[in-house]
Image: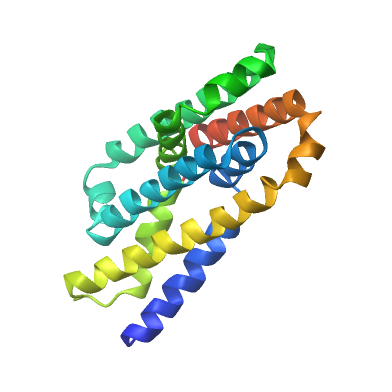
């Protein structure tokens, strides 16, 4: 398979994976609706940092790591599922906070927003398995290091483009006006979704 076909196959498979709704999608929508665009941007950058993290590991032998030390996958599985459950509980509990207080605090908490995006992405152990599978299926046995760098950048750019589009759509003035009156309902629903994702990560076998 030539390099152009590898780029195309990676872009196609990864693009389909990214647009499939998951934890990254739901946290992007939540941030777009209830927070400012600058905080949304930091959350998306965090998500893309998670993609960079897993893609880098996937490119350099993540399958071998999980095969050699199965406990590594189990640890990631439980820590990741627990973190998603934590995010869900935190979202539900935050419904008791006054909306004015949220408005005052959300603008200056960029680093926390980045971390939320980052850990939401890396907390799902299915992601590294999927990425490792992509590399295992699409790559020849020998591959120049710089080509791997280009592939990783391609995956990060695809992720950033998609979540930016999602964020722009849901952060529009019309969307915010529609959802403003349902702020607590959105937090509860997104909290339940995150809890279910977390339980799914822990309970469902890989």
Q: Residue at x 56, y 30 (%)?
A: 199
Task: Tell me residue 201's x, y (percent).
Answer: 51, 37
Disc count in the image? 0
- Quadrant holding the N terminus: bottom left
Task: Tell me residue 20's x, y (percent).
Answer: 60, 56
Task: Tell me residue 148's x, y (percent).
Answer: 26, 68
Q: Quadrant of residue 171?
A: top right
Which of 163/139 is in front? 163
Q: How is the image coloured?
A: rainbow
Q: Residue at x 18, y 75 (%)?
A: 144
Compared to 38, does 160 lie above or below? Answer: below
Left or right: 114 as drawn, with respect to 199: left
Which of 48/58 is in front? 48
Residue 137 appears in the rendering? yes
Residue 205 appears in the rendering? no
Compared to 103, does 118 lie above or below? Answer: below
Left or right: 187 as drawn, with respect to 137: right
Q: Residue at x 59, y 26 (%)?
A: 88
Task: Tell me residue 45's x, y (percent).
Answer: 42, 47
Q: Quadrant of residue 143?
A: bottom left
């Amino acid at each position: 398979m030539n390099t152009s076909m590898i780029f195309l196959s990676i872009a196609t498979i990864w693009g389909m994976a990214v647009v499939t709704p998951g934890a990254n999608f739901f946290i992007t929508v939540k941030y777009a609706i209830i927070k400012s665009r600058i905080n949304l941007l930091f959350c998306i950058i965090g998500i893309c940092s998670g993609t960079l993290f897993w893609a880098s590991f996937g490119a350099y032998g993540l399958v071998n790591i999980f095969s050699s030390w199965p406990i590594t996958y189990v640890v990631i599985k439980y820590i990741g599922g627990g973190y998603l459950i934590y995010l869900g509980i935190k979202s539900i509990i935050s419904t008791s906070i006054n909306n004015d207080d949220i408005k005052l605090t959300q603008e200056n908490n960029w680093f926390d927003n980045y971390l939320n995006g980052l850990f939401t992405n890396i907390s799902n152990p299915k992601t590294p398995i999927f990425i490792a599978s992509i590399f295992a299926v699409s790559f020849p046995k020998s591959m120049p290091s710089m080509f791997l760098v280009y592939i990783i950048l391609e995956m990060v750019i695809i992720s950033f483009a998609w979540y930016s589009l999602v964020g722009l759509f849901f952060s529009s003035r019309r969307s915010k006006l529609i959802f403003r009156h349902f702020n607590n309902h959105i937090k509860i629903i997104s909290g339940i979704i995150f809890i279910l994702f977390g339980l799914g990560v822990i309970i469902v076998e890989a």
